[in-house]
Structures are given as structure tokens and as C-alpha cells.
Image: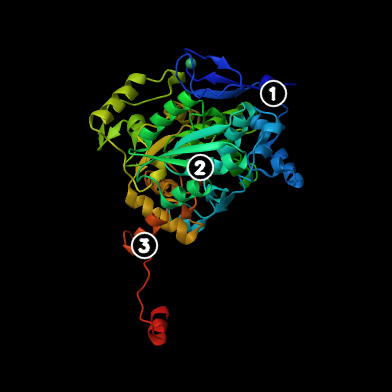
Amino acid sequence: MGITDTAYQKCINPDCGAQFDCWQALFKCPTCGELLDVQYNWDKIEVPNKLSDFAKRWANRGNPLDFSGVWRFRELLNFCDDKYKVTIGEGQTILQQNNAVAEYVDMKPGRLYLQYEGLNPSGSFKDNGMAAAFSHAKMVGATSSACASTGNTSASVALYAHSCGLKATVFIGSGRIAFGKLSQGMDYGAKTIQIRGDFDDCMRQVQDVCTKLGLYLLNSLNPFRLEGQKTIMYRIIEGLGWEVPDWIIVPGGNLGNSSAFGKAFYELKQLGLIEQIPRMAIINATGADTLTELVNAVRHGQVHNKKLLWNDGGVNQAIIDDYYADLTARNFSPHTCASAIEISRPVNLKKCLRALDICNGVVRAVTDEEILDAKAIVGKYGLGCEPASAATIAGLRHLRSEGIIDADQRVACVLTGHPLKDPNVTVSYHKEKQGEFSNPPIEAPNDLDEIIKLIK
Ligand SMILES: [Zn+2]
């Protein structure tokens, strides 16, 4: 059976619905300009009868595809032959039950789980998507790739590109990238172009550059990347003994993760591999809260009439256009310490609306102060995370105090990036005593007795 029998690309716009085979690198529907999905002919794929069957792959982990936390679920993202598949050992991530963080967010012991995607090779969840997208790049014969990035994408692209012999150019906003992430892109050998602008400016430029120069685009517009990101949910289910949690909580930036997670659960339900779809909470930073404003239609405590819904694909484009026109008129640029989600024009907005519909989702925004305090708690009691990841914990506190999430429901927060991604934010928080949990270094004279007094 040829692989083109099993998967194809399809426009998400129900009025268009154009279909394309997987041998093309398109990234937007050529007919109507909307986002594309990867869809499967499930009757032509041998999917296991139950999710626990995937556990057998561990016995064969000497095979890199069985070791990969992405490709060991390969029947669920079956768009390319094994000979094209790229892996650098991504997806060996930990689902940690954490009672101390549970107490901070007012959850009962044993009910809160943290999914540490910062343990991927490049230190963020992006590696899940890149394993899939670079496999597609190999499949279509691409030799040169590019992305716009707030940082994690550029690090992951640079690492995968040199691992599989592609050139990489990354576009970053000047002064808008965390130090750890900037260092990675350069160290992994990518051509780094700093544009005088923010992420949204970079995103516009990279699309034009890719079209003009025929580069393979690796932003989350790329539907194959989102296929890889689905596997984060499979691993959470695996970590829970092949059961689904009640809630998934994820930071909201360009909205690729939330889109991928919704698709993952929809497909698992469709295949009869899960009985119930968990609910999803997407957490914005207040300085970059496009999704919150559009979906909740609340601004500064006032309800506005722009509630945006998936509506079976009939999304009200005028609401989005008006909102973006207002951002442009105000010369608005998003600002948050959580640079990974400092995005005001999320490219996956419509797919995210679909995911909210699938998962009966909610959206909240949290302040930088809340993010930094939550980050310190994850650092003190867990394995640590970057600021954007901690938005999930801060958001969970809101949802607990509102009573949306019960204290004994089982909740999994996706911690997207490693704490060393953004050392400046961490050092400032502690040294400059920016929050309740700041833990600054203590100045001491070079004197044994004085030092002992400080430690006692
Ligand atoms: Zn279309």
C-alpha cells in the first residue's frame, strides 16, 4: 500500500474543503488561503485496538522509531514511509504527579500532573512537531528550511535541520527572544536573522521569504508539525496508565499545541481508543490575550459582542478582521515576560477554536506577576519550567477559585519549555525580589564564622 493512500491534506474551511496529497508542501490552502489539516483514511491504517498496545514498542526501543516518543505512536500520524522519518530521540518526557504544586493551586493530593516537555532534546515541546515536519520535509525533497520564532521554534528547527542535512534560517524579533533560546539557534548552526519588529512581523516576513525562495516553512502553519505535537497527549494518557485526564491545561501563544491536542482527542474518540474527551483550558498572558478577548468577549470587566466560535467551521471572519484592524490602528505590540506566548495574531486561531469546541474548552489570561510566582513554585517543588509554561499553573489557580475545575478532578498541565531557556527572567525574579517566592542570594563576608551564622 502506498503511503498516499493513507493520508492527505484538507482545507479546514468547510465552504472550500479542497484536498491535496501529502507530497506537496503547501501550508495554506491554494484555493482559499485557509489552514490545512492532515487527514487520514483510517480504514487503510492498521491502528491498534487499544492504546495500551503501544506499550509493546518499549521492548524494541533499540529501533530509533520505537524509542521516539513521537514515532512509537506512528499509526496515529501515518503520513510518510519509515524511510523518511526523522528522529533525534524526542519525546522522552516525564508526567510528574506533584502534590506541592497541587496545594498551591488548591487541588487535592494525587490529582495534579505536570507534563515536562522541556526534557526534549532542544529543551521544548517543539521537538515533537519538528520530528514530524522534518520527516515531511525529507519526503518532499526539501533542502532548505525556515521559521519565524519567539525562540523555542528556532532552537528546535536549528537542531533538527543539522541532524538531517537541511539548511535552516530562523527569523527572530529584535530583543524579543530569551537568552537560552538565542544561544541554541546560533550554537546549532542556523542562520539567524534578527528583524526589527516582534514575532508577528517575523511571521509575515518568513511566509513571503519561503514563497519567494522555495524554502520549507516550519512554523505551526505547517500541518505536519501539529501531527507530531499530538503525541504529547498520547504520552500523558500513557503516563496515566492509558487513561485520559479530566482536564488538559496548555499555554496559548500561536495556538498550535491546543489545535493539535484537540485534533488528537477527536481522532482517538473517532477510533474508539478513548471513551471521553478531556476538557481543555488555554491560558494567555494578559499582555498577549487575543484569544481570551475574542472567545470570552470580555475586556476590562466589560462584555463586548465579539464572542468568536468555531461554528462548524463557519468562523465569523469579520470579528477577527475588526480585532486585528484595531490592533494595527493602535500600533499594538504584545508584551509579556512569557516571551514564548508573546503573540497577538495567532496563526492557528481557527484550528484552536475547533479544539475548544471539541474539548468543551475555556480560555483565561493571567498576569506576568502570576506567571512568575507560579514559575517559582514549579521550580521550588517540581523540575522547573520556562515562564510561558507556568501560565498553566497560574491559570489553574483562576479556574479553581472560579469553581470551573474541581479539587478532585485529574488535571494535566503541559509545561512546554525547560527552565534554562530563560535564565534572565528567573534571575531577575529572585535577585530583584519581584515576587512572593523570590529566593535571592545572600551577600556574605569572606569569613567562616559569618558564613556559618547565615546558614544556621
Ligand atoms: Zn481552501
Tell me if label 1 and label 2 are in contact, CB under 8 Å.
no
Label 3 to label 2: alpha-carbon separation: 32 Å
Can you say which quadrant of the picture contains the N terminus?
Answer: top right
Where is residue 307 drawn, in percent x and y? 34, 26
First in residue order: circle 3 vs circle 2: 2
Tag 2 residue: 190
Q: Secondary structure at mark 1?
A: helix
Residue 47 locus on image (x, y percent): 70, 30
Separation of marks 1 and 2 at Cα, in angstroms: 31 Å
Q: Nearer the viewer, mark 1 or mark 3?
A: 1
Which quadrant of the structure image shows residue 45?
Answer: top right
Looking at the image, which residue is at 42% across and 83% down? 452
In percent of width and height, residue 193 lies at 42, 39
- The disc labelled 3 sits on which kind of residue? His
Res. 437 in view: no
Determine the secondary structure under disc 2.
loop
For disc 1, the marked residue is 3
Q: In the rendering, which numbered label is found on residue 430?
A: 3
Residue at mark 3: C-beta within 8 A of ligand 1:
no
Quarter of the figure that contains the C terminus: bottom left
10 Å neighbourhood of mark 3: few (<14), some, or many (≥20)? some
Question: What is the crowding at mark 2: few (fewer than 14 residues within 10 Å), some, or many (at least 20)?
Answer: many
Mark 1 or 3 closer to N-term? Answer: 1
Instruction: Using a 10 Å C-alpha cutoff, classify the residue at mark 1 as few (fewer than 14 neighbours), some (14 to 19) or many (20 or more).
Output: some
Question: Which label's residue is closer to the chain start, 1 or 2?
Answer: 1
- The answer to whether residue 52 is left or right of residue 250 is right
Q: Is residue 200 left or right of residue 271?
A: left
Asked if labels 3 and 1 touch by Cβ distance under 8 angstroms, the answer is no
Q: What residue is rendered at 56% in x and 15% in y?
A: 19
The residue nearer to you, when weighing 311 against 204, is 204
Residue type at numbered disc 1: Ile
Q: Amino acid at mark 2?
A: Ala
